[in-house]
Image (cartoon, grey):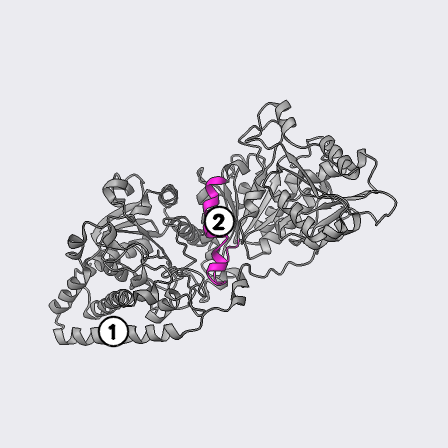
Amino acid sequence: MANKISKITLKKGFLYMYTAKTMAELYEDNFKQVSKYVHATSRGHEAVQTALGMQLLPQDYAFPYYRDDAMLLSFGLQPYDLMLQLLAKKEDPFSGGRTYYSHPSLKDDDKPKIPHQSSATGMQAIPATGVAMGLQYLEKQGLNVVTSEHAKASFPSGRIEDGLVVCSLGDASVTEGEIAEAFQMAALKQMPILYLVQDNGWDISANASETRAQNAFEYAQGFHGLDAISIDGANFTESYLALEKVIKTIREERRPFLVHAKVPLLNHHTSGVRMEWYRDDLEEARSRDPYPVIRQQLLDNGFSSEEIDQLEQSVKAKVQSDFEKALKAEDPKPEDLFTHDFVPTQITEETGERSPKGAEKVVMVDCALFAVEELMAKYKECLLYGQDVGGRLGGVFREAATLAQKFGDDRVFNTPIQEAFIVGSTVGMSAVGLKPIVEVQFADYIWPGLNQLFTEVSRSCYLSNGKWPVSMILRVPIGAYGSGGPYHSSSVESVITNIRGIKIAYPSNGADLKGLMKAAYYDPNPVVILEHKGLYWSKVPGTQGATSVEPAEDYVLPFGKAWVLQEIWKQEQVETLTIVTYGMGVHWAMNASEELGMKEQIEVIDLRTLFPLDEDTIMKSVKKTGKCLVVTEEPSNNSFALALAGKIQEECFRYLDAPVMTIGSENMPAIPLNSTLEQTMIPSTDKVKSKIMDLLQY
C-alpha cells in the first residue's frame, strides 16, 4: 500500500473539509437565524469523516451520527441539502423538516444508502449491524442478484457487490450496553462492518476520565474477531490511507473492524450547549485543528498559496449562496404533518379460504408455525431468529419446531439473549430487502427491546419521509398461564399501543393468527403480534375455541377488521350490552354469555388487532346495545382498555344507558407464582359474568 495519496484526492478532501469548516463558521456568524433549531457541526472531526466518506460506494450503507456533516458532504451532498435540514424546510431531502440537522436518511442511486438516523447516541450500532447481517445473509443465500420487489427498492441497480456497512459513533456512546450487543454479534458472525469511533474526549460536559475506563480501541480488544486500530483522525492523509487499507480488507475478507480516531472538538457540543460554558481544554484542542494540517499537505504536494486561496474563495461563495437560497426555501405546510406514518399496505380485504373442506382442526401454535413455514418456503427473503428458535429446540413453545431442519441454520437461528439486538437488527435487515420474523421469548422480556422498537423501528418511515419503512414481524408470547410467575406472565399491550408507527395484532384463535401473520408479512410496515401462550394449545379450560380448522395457504386477514363473533339484534324490551375484547378475553366473554344464558343479549367483538383499531364496528355495536364492557387481561388502571372505554364513552355518550365499564387483572405489580394467587389476580369467566350482571342491572 502506497504511503501517499494523489493530488486529486488531496484536493477533493480539502474542498470537503473546508466546506464543512465554512458552514460551521457561517452558522456561528448567523447564530440567531439558525439557532431556532438545534444543530451540531463536524468542526475538528472533518478529516477522518471526509477520508472515510470519499471511499464509500453506492452499494455501501452508512450510519452517520449527528456531528457527521463533513461525511455527508463527501458522499456528494451539497451544503444546500444540509441547510434545508438545518432550517427544517419542506424540501429537506432527509426528513422533510421533521428532524434535526445532520440526521440523514438517503436512498439515492449514486450515493451510499443511509437508513433513518435518530438522535439517541449509540442507537445506530444495532441497526447498522443488522444491515451487515443482512448483507451476509444475501451472500450466503445467493441473493446478491436481487429478485424481490421489496429488495429492488433498496438496490435499484439489481446487484449487491462487496457492499459494506459503516457505523459512525462518538466515543462516549461506546459505553452503552447496546454497543456491546452490536460488537458481540459482528464479532461472532464475522460481518462486513466498519465501526468508526470519533473520540473527542467529551460526552457533553463530562470528559473521558469521568466516564470511561478505556477508549474504544482498548474496549474492542475484548471482542475476539473484531480487529481495531487507532489513528490520528485530525490528519487527512493518515486517516485516508489507514481507512483505505481497512475498507479493502472488509470488502475482500468480509469481517468487522473498529477504527478509533482521535479528534479535537472545535465547536459547541450542539448549538444549545455552548463550549465556553464547560470546556477547559479549548487551547489544546485548537492546536490539533485538522485544517492547518491539510493545508500544509497541499503545500507539500505542490499547491501554491494562491491556488489554495482561490479554492477557499470558491467554497465561501458556494456556502453563502446556498445559505441564502435555503433561507428562502418553503416551510412545510400543516397538512405535511400527516404523511408517511405508514406505507400503504395492499392487504385490505379478507381473501382466501379460511375453513377448507377436509382440513384438520389444529391448535393455535401450529397455525402460526404453518404460516411461517409456508412463507419461508415461498420467499427466500423471509427468515426467523430469536432466542432458542434454532434447530435444537424450535422455540420454548415449539412455535418454530422443524423450521431450522427444513430451511437451514442460516435462515432459522438462535441469537444471544439480546432483545435490543433482536428487535433493532430488523431495521437493517429490512433496509437490504429482507423480511425478518423475530421473537422475544416472553412479553416480560420485551423491555430491553423497547428502546429500539420505539426509537428506531417505529419512527423510521415517518422521520425518513417514507424512504425507509421497517418491514418486520415481532412475535411476542404474552399473558398468564399455568403458574408462569411474575416474569413469564405479564400483559404489556398498553405500553406497545403507545408506540406510534407500528401495527399490533392480538388474535384469539389459530385461524386469525395465521391470516394476520400472512397479512403482516405482506405489510411493508413493522408489526407486533401478541400471542397468548395460554391459547397456544387450548389447555386452559374453556379455550377450545382457540383451535381452528387450519386456513388454506392463500388465506389473508387484514389488520383493522374486528370480528363480531357473537352478533345480536337491536332489542327494546330487554337489556343488551357489547363486550369489546381480544386474546384470552374473547374466551372469557363467550363462556360468560353462554353460562348466563344471555347469548342473545350480549354482542361480543373480537378486536383481533389493537392497531389499527376497528372503531366503526365498536361504535356501531355500542350504539345498538346501549351498554359496553371492555375485557382485558392487563391490570385496568391506565390501560389500553381504559383508554378505549373512554373513547367509546366520548363517541357513544348519547346512546349509553350506563357508564362504559372495564374488567382486567388486579392492579398489583406482578402476577404471583402460586396458582391461587395467580387466579385471584387475573380475570376469569366467573369474574366476567359478575361484571356483566353489574352492568346489565345498572
Vertical arrangement, residue 462 with respect to residue 635, above or below: below
Q: Is residue 449 magenta?
A: yes
Occupied quadrant, residue 360: top right
Q: Which residue is mark 1?
A: 316
What are the residue bounds of the magenta stretch? Answer: 447-471
Residue 606 circle label:
none
The quadrant of the image that shows the C terminus is: top right
Residue type indicated by callout 2: Phe
Tell me the chief SS of the magenta region: helix
Residue occupying the point 54% across, 67% down: 335
Residue occupying the point 56% across, 40% down: 492
Occupied quadrant, residue 237: bottom left
Residue 454 circle label:
2
Out of 462 and 354, give the one closest to the viewer.
462
Q: Residues within 10 Å of mark 1 (few under 14, many from 20)?
A: some
The quadrant of the image that shows the N terminus is: bottom left
Q: Position of residue 339 (x, y in %)?
A: 54, 63
Seen in the image, is 579 located left or right of residue 519?
right
